[in-house]
Image: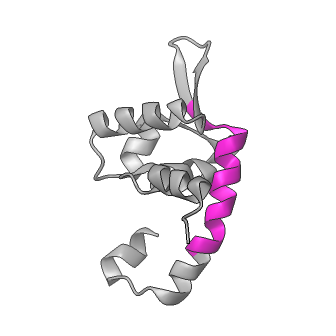
Amino acid sequence: MEVCPYLEETFKILGRSWNGLLINYLSRSENYAAHFSDIKRDLKSITPRALSLKLTELSEWGLVEKKVISTTPLSIKYVLTAKGVALSEAMHPIEAWAQEHLELEDSNRSEA
């Protein structure tokens, strides 16, 4: 039996460090958008360099878009595209499964 190539490609995206968490984070943000500094503040263990690389990677897959907002000073937000929103919605059943079947250490529960 062959593995579905579409599923395989999806797990190439989600299987890379931070990608699934970044998609989930943006999906929970107002208007599916957040500033770099907000993401960095809330995902404490990601380095600024890794965050920048991951946002670029997600942008190349068409899941995230970098929006420049004409304010003084300029403001930049990272926004889930329609494709990114659809993927985040597909992740909801996985999150529900995890909440039902996985046990986390108490320190991890307080962050969720």
Write the residue at 62% across / 51% down: 27
Q: Where does the image place residue 58, in percent across and percent down from the top left?
A: 50, 38
Write the residue at 67% across / 62% down: 90
Rendered position, 18 above or below 105: above
Nearer to us in this view, 96 or 16: 16
Side (left or right) of 48 relative to 65: left
Q: Where does the image place residue 57, in percent across and percent down from the top left?
A: 44, 35
Side (left or right) of 41 relative to 29: left
Q: Quadrant of the N terminus?
A: bottom right
Q: Where does the image place residue 30, in percent across and percent down from the top left?
A: 66, 45
- Quarter holding residue 92: bottom right
Side (left or right) of 21 relative to 41: right
Residue interval drawn in magenta: 78-95
Nearer to us in this view, 9 or 91: 9
Nearer to us in this view, 104 or 8: 8
Based on the picture, tell me whether residue 83 belongs to the magenta stretch: yes
Nearer to us in this view, 87 or 78: 87
Based on the picture, tell me whether residue 29 belongs to the magenta stretch: no
The colour scheme applied to this rendered structure is one colour
Q: Where does the image place residue 32, in percent across and percent down from the top left?
A: 65, 44
Q: Is residue 48 visible?
A: yes
Write the residue at 49% across / 57% down: 11
Could you tell me how many numbered marks the image carries?
0
Magenta span dominant secondary structure: helix
Side (left or right) of 88 relative to 22: right
Q: Is residue 25 visible?
A: no
